[in-house]
Image (spheres, rainbow, N blue to C red):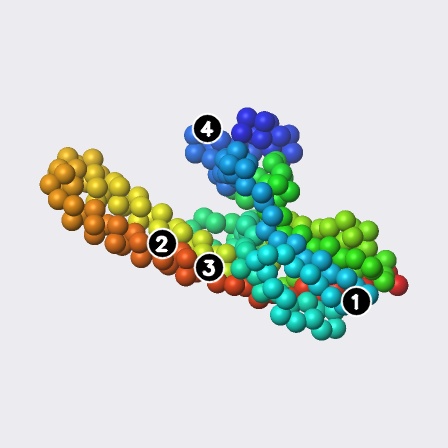
């Protein structure tokens, strides 16, 4: 976080603050660096998925957690049960304070995408790779969801990380629903510990728990329902990758 704060100030100005304005409560960029440190230390591999398209054969091969639905006229439809981490959420779906797609900026410390410029989060922990083999054109316009971007045949042969190239993507809306369910669970966990278990500092709350298991049982019943809601929010996402030759 120390080096990230230094790098952030060098890139984005002296008001950029990884540890937050008070030096204690980070904004989103600081949280990205903390998450990167923990997840890397846990040894998570970061392989979300790999899609390999053979242009000449008009075929696509996908890794575990994904399946091919159809291939037609340069459009490859895939169903994915493995999600990438999305750095922004669509307007109207974003949970409180979460960066909104199209409105966040990499130059501010309240942006997840900004934090991703200071540590190799996507490279090490968030890889959803597209490889294009046997290209018949110098380059291709890659469309994923509503977004499009041009790449050379050489870049595509070496592989591009879709989630890094397309921060707003077909997973964003589904990711927002999962994030909202997680936020609801976390909000209840604060209430569960501070109020239901400990009475928010009132000894009578702790005494009540000591006298009876009913408070714990009731709390955990509600907590289990919120966990189930998170699991239910994780539904497969159907998305389409389109290739259009350019530079002929």
Mark closer to the chain start, 4 or 3: 4
Mark closer to the chain start, 2 or 1: 1
Badge 1 density bin: few <14, some 14–19, many ≥20, Cα 10 Å: few
Mark closer to the chain start, 2 or 4: 4
- How far from the left and from the top, in percent, is residue 51? 68, 57
Badge 3 density bin: few <14, some 14–19, many ≥20, Cα 10 Å: some
* Residue reaching furthest to the left: 211
Which residue is at a point 60% across and 64% down the rendered structure image? 67
Residue at the disc numbered 2: 227
Q: In this view, does 3 lie to the left or right of 156?
A: left
Q: Distance between the residues labelled 2 and 1?
A: 44 Å
Q: Work out which quarter of the rendered image holds the C terminus and state it.
A: bottom right
- How far from the left and from the top, in percent, is residue 108? 57, 40
Residue 105 visible (yes or no): no
Callout 4 secondary element: loop
Which residue is at a point 50% across and 60% down the rendered structure image? 174
Residue at the disc numbered 3: 234
């Amino acid at each position: 976080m120390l080096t990230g704060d230094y790098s952030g100030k060098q890139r984005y100005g002296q008001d950029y603050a990884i540890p937050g304005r008070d030096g204690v409560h980070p904004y989103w960029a600081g949280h990205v660096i903390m998450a990167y440190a923990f997840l890397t230390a846990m040894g998570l591999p970061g392989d979300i998925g790999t899609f390999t398209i053979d242009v000449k054969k008009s075929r696509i091969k996908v890794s575990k957690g994904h399946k091919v639905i159809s291939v037609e006229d340069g459009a490859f439809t895939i169903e994915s049960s493995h999600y990438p981490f999305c750095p922004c959420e669509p307007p109207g779906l974003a949970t409180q304070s979460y960066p909104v797609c199209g409105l966040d900026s990499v130059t501010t410390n309240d942006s997840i995408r900004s934090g991703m410029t200071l540590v190799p989060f996507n490279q090490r922990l968030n890889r959803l790779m597209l490889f294009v083999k046997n290209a018949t054109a110098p380059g291709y316009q890659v469309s994923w969801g509503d977004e499009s971007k041009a790449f050379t045949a050489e870049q595509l042969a070496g592989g591009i990380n879709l989630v890094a190239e397309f921060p707003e993507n077909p997973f964003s809306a589904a990711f927002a629903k999962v994030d909202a369910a997680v936020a609801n669970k976390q909000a209840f966990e604060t209430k569960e510990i501070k109020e239901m278990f400990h009475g928010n500092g009132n000894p009578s709350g702790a005494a009540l728990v000591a006298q009876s298991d009913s408070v714990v049982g009731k709390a955990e019943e509600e907590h289990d329902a919120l966990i189930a809601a998170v699991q239910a929010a994780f539904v497969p996402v159907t998305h389409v990758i389109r290739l259009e030759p350019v530079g002929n």
